[in-house]
């Protein structure tokens, strides 16, 4: 096959794999079917909780749950108003506080949220926590992690399907996933969320916070 024809096929595949970011209308690369990314997300989330001390029953843990549920409700309302509630199909929201000095919080696909105790002195109260959770959940529902994971699969594994990648290179694929969603160290070409991603998450996150 000629290089030119091969390039056309690859380009067409990328174009067909594009989806649209909520609110901005920006096209993004997404070659991973939602059921696959959700399945991997739920597995990795459960594994993370097993490996870390989850705090329950404290005022701080209850605050994380309370604020998280408010943001969840705002997300669901926003998506319903936009007529895109189907994009939340398969979401199984969870909000957990874990004991860790890192200043961090994140949301995996499917609404799987973790807040580290190290960020609470920074957020100080429910309003500060709502800003953080709104931002992190916005990354998830705007599918920024999916986009980064797709980029990683394209560059490092030649666009291999996620299921195949898990079979042939499970460790690399897991590291790509953790990095794409802000949990792991940088892997290859995957960099921190871009300014564009951060801008979209800021915009959408503030909407969720205001609606919550």
Image: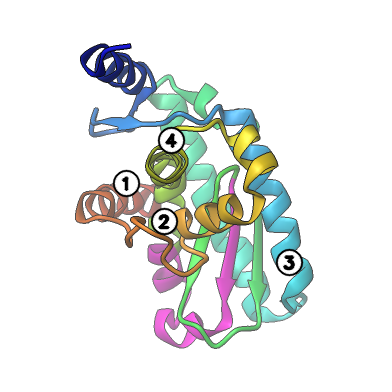
In the rendered image, residue 130 lying in the magenta stretch gets the answer yes
Percent of width and height locating residue 38: 63, 38
Looking at the rendering, the stretch of residues picked out in magenta corresponds to 111-132
Q: Is mark 4 on a helix, strand or loop?
A: loop
Taking the image as drawn, is residue 92 in sight?
no
> Which mark, by number, is residue 134?
2
Q: What colouring does the structure picture have? A: rainbow
Earlier residue among tags 3 and 2:
3
Percent of width and height locating residue 156: 43, 46
Who's the residue at 25% across and 19% down the image? 3
Q: Do the residues labelled 4 and 3 touch (CB within 8 Å)?
A: no
List the residue tagged with mark 4: 158
Q: Do the residues labelled 2 and 1 touch (CB within 8 Å)?
A: yes
Q: Do the residues labelled 3 and 2 touch (CB within 8 Å)?
A: no
Earlier residue among tags 4 and 3:
3
Q: Distance between the residues labelled 2 and 4?
A: 34 Å
In the displayed structure, 193 sits above or below 1; it is: below
Mark 2 crowd level (few <14, some 14–19, many ≥20, 10 Å Cα): many
Who's the residue at 47% across and 41% down the image? 157
Earlier residue among tags 2 and 4:
2
Earlier residue among tags 3 and 1:
3
List the residue tagged with mark 3: 49
Q: How far apart are marks 2 and 1 (CA)?
A: 8 Å
Q: Is mark 1 on a helix, strand or loop?
A: helix
In the displayed structure, 92 sits above or below 183; it is: above
Q: Which residue occupies the foreground of this view, 22 or 181?
A: 181
Q: Nearer the viewer, mark 3 or mark 2?
A: 3
Taking the image as drawn, is residue 59 in sight?
yes
Earlier residue among tags 1 and 4:
4
Percent of width and height locating residue 127: 41, 69
């Amino acid at each position: 096959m000629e290089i030119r024809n091969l390039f056309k096929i690859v380009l067409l595949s990328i174009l067909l794999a594009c989806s649209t970011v909520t609110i901005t209308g920006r096209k993004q690369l997404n070659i991973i079917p939602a059921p696959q990314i959700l399945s991997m997300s739920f597995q990795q989330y459960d594994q993370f909780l097993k490996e870390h001390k989850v705090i329950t029953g404290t005022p701080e843990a209850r605050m994380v749950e309370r604020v998280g549920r408010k943001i969840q409700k705002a997300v669901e309302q926003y998506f319903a108003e936009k007529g895109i509630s189907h994009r939340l199909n398969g979401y199984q929201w969870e909000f957990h506080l874990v004991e860790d000095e890192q200043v961090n919080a994140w949301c995996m696909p499917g609404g799987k949220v973790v807040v580290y105790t190290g960020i609470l002195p920074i957020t100080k109260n429910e309003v500060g926590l709502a800003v953080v959770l709104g931002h992190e959940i916005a990354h998830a529902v705007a599918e920024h992690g999916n986009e980064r994971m797709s980029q990683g699969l394209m560059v490092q594994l030649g666009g291999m399907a996620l299921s195949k990648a898990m079979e042939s290179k499970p460790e690399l694929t897991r590291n790509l996933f953790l990095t794409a969603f802000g949990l792991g160290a940088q892997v290859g070409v995957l960099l921190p969320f871009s300014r564009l991603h951060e801008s979209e998450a800021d915009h959408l996150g503030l909407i969720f916070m205001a609606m919550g």
